[in-house]
Image (tube, rainbow, N blue to C red):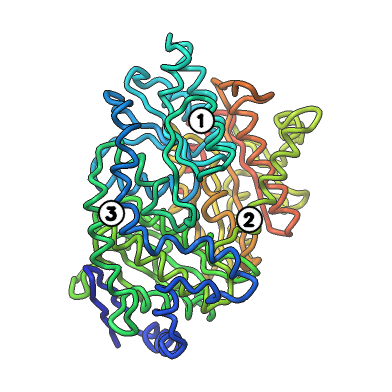
Amino acid sequence: MTSVVTAGGISVTIRGAVVDESETVLDRLVSDGVPGSLTSRNAKLWGPDAAPLAARRLGWLDLPETSRSLRDRLAGPAGAAAGLDRIVLAAAGGAALAAEAICRKAGAELTVLDTTDPHEVSGALSGDLSRTLVVVADDGVEADSVRRVFGRAFSEAGLGGAEAAHRFLVVADEGSDLAHAAEEAGHHLVLAEPDVGDRFGALGARSLVPAALAGVDVDALLDEATGFAATLRQPYENPALALGAALGSSALGVRDKLVIADHGSGLAGLAGWAEQLVAGAMGKDGRGLLPVVVESADAPGFELADDLRRVILGRRPDEPGAGREAGVSVAGPLGAQFLLWEYAVAVASRVTGVNPFDAPDVRASRESTEALLRSEEGAAPTVVRRPPELVEDAVEVHAPEDALRGARTLGEALETILADVPGGGYLAVLAYLDRSGDAAAAALRPLLAARGGKVRRHPAPVTFGWGPRYLHTAGQYHKGGPPNGAFLQITGAVTGDVPVPGRPYSLGELQLAQAFGDLRVLRALGRPAVRLHLRDRAAGLAQLAAALA
């Protein structure tokens, strides 16, 4: 059985058993009047406890129209920054991922720094500073550190106080500490929407400002969203409601993993943005739907299993080839897809009974990191002094006592890790490395997925995330979702550290504190977690790949 819902430039195709499972949920959503209530910004849709926060987080529904004023709001700062055509975005979470996806679709240059890796930040610092404008779109430790590091770099490049200050544009809520700090420092300031959170703000100022400065026609993106927005109130022929029902029914049942593969959509980065939205909004209270982004429909881990729901991005319903058997296919332009997924996830969260707008479990890792940075000896000694359970050439294996069960080689240790994933669970690879210089780390996901198929009768899904990026994306699910995850964290030696001006730590120490802080939280929750430390990053990654090949 196949159901195809097409409207507003979006096509959602649902196949097989998913149709029957989601139709009951869809009928209930329609009978409850959810389409009209959501588009009318009814904050009570997720229960009384969620209503106060939801009332301050539903502005994303209006962004296709309200963001039209962005051109005027940006005119002054953009004019003052004329000639600065190398845009660096210091942000985290949904804003960073949406801006990255928008610029990749448009072919615009944007350097996204949602990291504390000193190698990656040094690479950005080595670019042409005479052309560089830094957009700061949140007040987290990553963005704050990047702002401080670039401030020093501008000063060392000979820029005076006012000139250096004008190399920063801050996007912040009116009256926030970040806005006040920007005004005091003399930075350009663009006010963000007061009722839009980061997770659902793909069409808001935090994402569109850096994209617009990078040369993207954001009005065209908003046109795509506007063309789709009219369908959201409809009880039928509503692709977003159909997708929300499919996601919600999956999360209620045994298929609590959402495997996402791109099949020629031309929307590079959309899957990563959707991952943060689905995991962050739905992964809490022991419930959720885990997104598993794979490289293609042919990649290890995409094959059908009882606990997997598979989504193809970009496929037409009548198109032959790999992935045709996926349970859900989604096609349409990027602006409309942002709105599609936000609406669908809000609906699915109502189905599962969670508040999509909070992040109750993200705070634990942040507080653990802060405690390490306040410790008397600092973060780095706390981590390094613990001896590894196994050392093989460039790779150290750090694990709780007896976790490796006598493994004598790196290959045996990796097989033990795969074998110990809880039944019905997943393995998450968390790489605190350089996304550019250590890009080979991402290739470990399909290698682990393929090896898992040989180690286990029913191989576990394998996800991959860059640290600390994942803390603001799937990190909420890892701590707040179903307790069936296992974790393989990867850290690497730092050969050129970067001090953080005004802070008693370097980027390398901060990065290691974030890694170890999250590891402590995961282990405190009883999650199996092993850390691999690469004494030499390139050699260690090659060694891991060889051990898994």
Label 3 CA crowd tier, 10 Å (few <14, some 14–19, many 20+): many
Measuring from the top left, give residue 305's x and y in whole percent. 45, 74
Distance between the alpha carbons at the discs numbered 1 and 2:
54 Å
Distance between the alpha carbons at the discs numbered 3 and 1:
36 Å
CB contact under 8 Å: marks 3 and 2: no
Residue type at mark 2?
Thr
Label 1 CA crowd tier, 10 Å (few <14, some 14–19, many 20+): few
Q: Which residue is mark 3?
A: 267
Q: Residue at x 37, y 75 (%)?
A: 243
- Judge from the rendering whether residue 361 lies leftward or rightward of residue 195; answer left or right: right
Whichever of labels 3 and 1 marks the residue nearer the N terminus, that label is 1
Q: Which residue is mark 1?
A: 183
Label 2 CA crowd tier, 10 Å (few <14, some 14–19, many 20+): some
Residue type at mark 1?
Glu
Whichever of labels 1 and 2 marks the residue nearer the N terminus, that label is 1
Look at the image and tell me in which quarter the N terminus lies: bottom left
Distance between the alpha carbons at the discs numbered 3 and 2:
37 Å
Residue type at mark 3?
Leu
Find the residue positioned furthest to the top. Answer: 158
- Judge from the rendering whether residue 270 lies leftward or rightward of residue 287; answer left or right: left
- Judge from the rendering whether residue 455 lies leftward or rightward of residue 341; answer left or right: right
The image quarter in which residue 506 lies: top right
Q: In the drawing, what numbered circle is on residue 416?
A: 2
Q: Residue at x 41, y 26 (%)?
A: 124
Q: Secondary structure at mark 1?
A: helix
